[in-house]
Image (tube, helix red, strand yellow):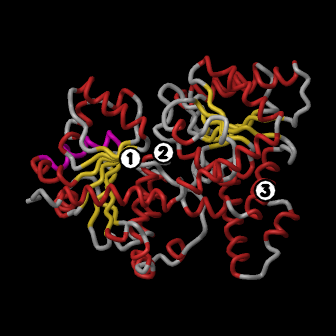
Amino acid sequence: MAKPPPSAAASAAGGRGPAHHRTRLLLLLLVAVAASAFTAGYVLRGGPVGPCDTRGDPVDVVAARAGGAASSPLGFMKSKLVLLVSHELSLSGGPLLLMELAFLLRQVGCQVVWITNQRPEGTNDVSYSLEHKMLNHGVQVLPARGQEAVETALKADLVILNTAVAGKWLDAVLKDNVPQVLPKILWWIHEMRGHYFKLEYVKHLPLVAGAMIDSHITVEYWKTRTHDRLNIQMPQTFAVHLGNSKELTEVAEDNVARRVLREHIRESLGVRSEDLLFAMINSVSRGKGQDLFLQAFHQSLQLIQHQKLKVPKVHAVVVGSDMSAQTKYETQLRDFVAKNGIHDRVHFINKTLAVAPYLAAIDVLVQNSQARGECFGRITIEAMAFKLPVLGTAAGGTTEIVLDGSTGLLHPAGKEGVTPLAKNMVRLASHVEQRVSMGNKGYARVKERFMEHHMAERIAVVLKEVLHKSQQHPHS
């Protein structure tokens, strides 16, 4: 494993108070996690090591935090029983967001039960690690099928279905009990792709207590699509923007942490401190647009050379590869790099949830999701917390986060967006003052509306409304 540069490590360890020792432990953890991402298939999102991670007694931990219920906007959920149903347990955004909500609820003394509807066959390291993390936070994990799952759904004060696909669990498991559970279901939807609009997934959607979706534009899309394609009506639907976790925010606001992580990652990539890094941090797939990003990056190199611009050496970083199972799409990406002779400028990094080290190391985030874009795109607000400008597609939730010309620059989705993106990359490479200004404005926007407590407040409003509506219906 590569070590942090000696000078940076010395700076990180320079203080002797508890805060400095905690920072040092945090840095060591993040550096270890980031380094493992180059060789290991999957790692979990890094964060400060807390009592839940070391003592293995989640009940005591939650009891110690019980005082937080009074100050948390979710404090009214104390002693409530909440069943969370996820279609899968993986490193994708939906399950991880539901896990984060589970932990927020546990912090206020809520009883939380988790069910994964589609479990992979055999041993799966990712599922095992995520389940272990939940158990350490006091979340009870149940099999998706069986009488215990049915009884928990009937007893629960609230049932949260996560993603449209999770709707298949209702008929498969609850069977005749579905009508009793529907009035206390909150359906949390993150999808924007057309193939999720199937009646077998969402036929019960009109009868649940409410739906929660991550952006206003996606709410309107779901209302229109369900009406026009499926001839069903959406329930009361809430647009709830996400927020950054406290762990990520802590790293983003720690100058020493950012410097150490930046130096370490850049050393691992073989790039200099003065080089300029444009990065995409998404799972590698055609819908995320890594191919168009690399085409734009190649064009930007040509523009810089043609215009004889004096700019730092620029690099493209693609975080989200799967080294163990290269797809046809990823092979095409690597072939494009080789064909155009830019292998020394393009860096592929394996899948990782430890995004903080890479956000500390790069200079500009590119959010290049195609078609209708992202439902929200949490990596965008995470990058803004690190004072990074964002180059994003003018589609989906990105348009509700990035202020064009202020916190970043937007370009069209599709092939017509390649040249505008290339020009935007050259623009930011040529004007350091714009990068700094956009980064600062993005950070201010995050502090104003995209923090964890903002998300908790928005979710609390929804949960109160759904609980109130649920209480108007008998469940037995």
Residue occupying image coordinates x 42% and y 70%: 72
What whole-number distance in Å separates the C-alpha atoms at marks 3 and 2? 28 Å
Q: In this picture, is 240 found above or below 409? A: below
In-front residue for pair 371/318: 371
Q: Which amino acid does label 3 sit on?
A: Ala
- Mark 3 or mark 2, whichever is nearer to me: 2
Place residue 336 in its image quadrant.
top right
Residue occupying image coordinates x 49% and y 36%: 374
Label annotation for residue 92: 2
Please indicate, yes or no, whether residue 334 appears anywhere in the rendered image: no
Q: Give the range drawn in magenta.
A: 163-175
Q: Where is residue 456 in the image (x, y as percent from the top left)?
A: 43, 60
Label annotation for residue 88: 1
Locate the N terminus by quadrant.
Answer: bottom right
What whole-number distance in Å separates the C-alpha atoms at marks 1 and 3? 34 Å
Q: What residue type is labelled 2?
A: Ser
Q: Is residue 229 left or right of residue 207?
A: right
Q: Where is residue 392 in the image (x, y as percent from the top left)?
A: 61, 34
Local SS, label 1: loop
Q: In this view, does 433 lie to the left or right of 229?
A: right
By secondary structure, the bulk of the magenta-drawn segment is best described as: helix
Local SS, label 3: loop
Pick whichever of labels 1 and 3 is earlier in the sequence. 3
Q: Position of residue 22 (x, y in %)?
A: 68, 74
What whole-number distance in Å separates the C-alpha atoms at marks 2 and 1? 9 Å
**Mark 2 touches mark 1? (CB < 8 Å):** yes
Residue occupying image coordinates x 39% and y 70%: 138
Label annotation for residue 2: 3
